[in-house]
Amino acid sequence: MTTPRLDSESSGLADAEPSPGVGLWTRPLSLVLLALAAWGGRALLAGPHFGWLLWNLFLAVCPWLVSGWLVARRRSSLTFAVTFATWLVLLPNAPYLLTDLVHLRERLPVPLAVDVLVFAAFGLAGVGLGLASLATMEAEVGRRLGPRAAVGMVLAVLPLCGWGVFLGRFQRWNSWDVLVRPGALLEGSLDALLHVKPVAFSAGFAALLAALYVAVRPPTPRRARSR
């Protein structure tokens, strides 16, 4: 895919710098391949179980693909707005894979250590897909609206993502319920906001994602000023 570039009109540059974070876009593929290999290796040992992990991995890939499609070429403002909203709804599906660790238990004859590796591989793949997608979107928002807007977007998206993971894991809502059951989803979400545990889980999960994002996000390249 073509690497998007930052606009340089405001700085008077003839050429734009590459968008920060976009170089991270393809890196989660190694984690996806690792997860699939781990699942396949376990299937050789005890049969093709945990098919739902593959489904969850597919859902995790969706926001990553959406963000990549958006920045592959210049899009209109309307297309950007619609795509961004779609991406935001899909984004929690990626780090949601980390919460599949709640299913981890010994299932003989497969050693528990094997399942630890399988679940860890899928969790890392989900987090990697989500953070790479977020970095790509941050770069695109920065290109369109400036670096402050990009940082503001990240600070707003991370708590929303944590809340979305809570709704999916504990209230069992799906991304498509935004379209097919919006009223019930809104009612359930508002009700959960009145309780401490849902808010605490969402805040903690958002903090985890924020710490990981700070750790892996590539530094924003400095642009030379025009003279």
Image (tube, rainbow, N blue to C red):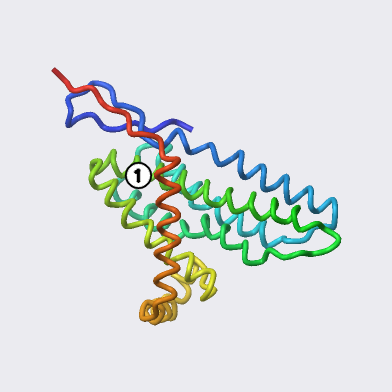
Image quadrant in which you'd find residue 169: bottom right
Which residue is located at x 39 percent, y 71 percent?
199
* Total tally of numbered discs in the picture: 1
Q: Is residue 192 above or below residue 214?
A: below
Q: Is residue 117 above or below residue 189?
A: above
Q: Seen from this angle, which residue lies furthest left?
A: 227
- Quadrant (top left/top right/bottom left/bottom right) for the C terminus: top left
Q: Residue 218's spot in the image, x, y percent?
A: 40, 35
Crowding around mark 1 (Cα neighbors within 10 Å: few <14, some 14 to 19, many 20+) is many
Q: Is residue 115 left or right of residue 142?
A: right
Q: Is residue 227 above or below residue 212?
A: above
Which residue is located at x 49 percent, y 33 percent?
1
Which residue is located at x 52 percent, y 55 percent?
94
Q: Residue 160's spot in the image, x, y percent?
A: 38, 62
Q: Seen from this angle, which residue lies furthest top?
A: 227
Q: Residue 153's spot in the image, x, y percent?
A: 30, 52
At label 1, the amino acid type is Glu
Which of 129 and 71 lies nearest the eye of the viewer?
129
Which of 137 and 46 lies nearest the eye of the viewer?
46
Q: Which residue is mark 1?
A: 138
The residue tagged with tag 1: helix, strand or loop?
A: helix
Q: Is residue 195 above or below residue 59?
A: below
Q: Residue 21's spot in the image, x, y percent?
A: 40, 37
Image quadrant in which you'd find residue 73: top left
Which of 207 and 188 lies nearest the eye of the viewer?
207
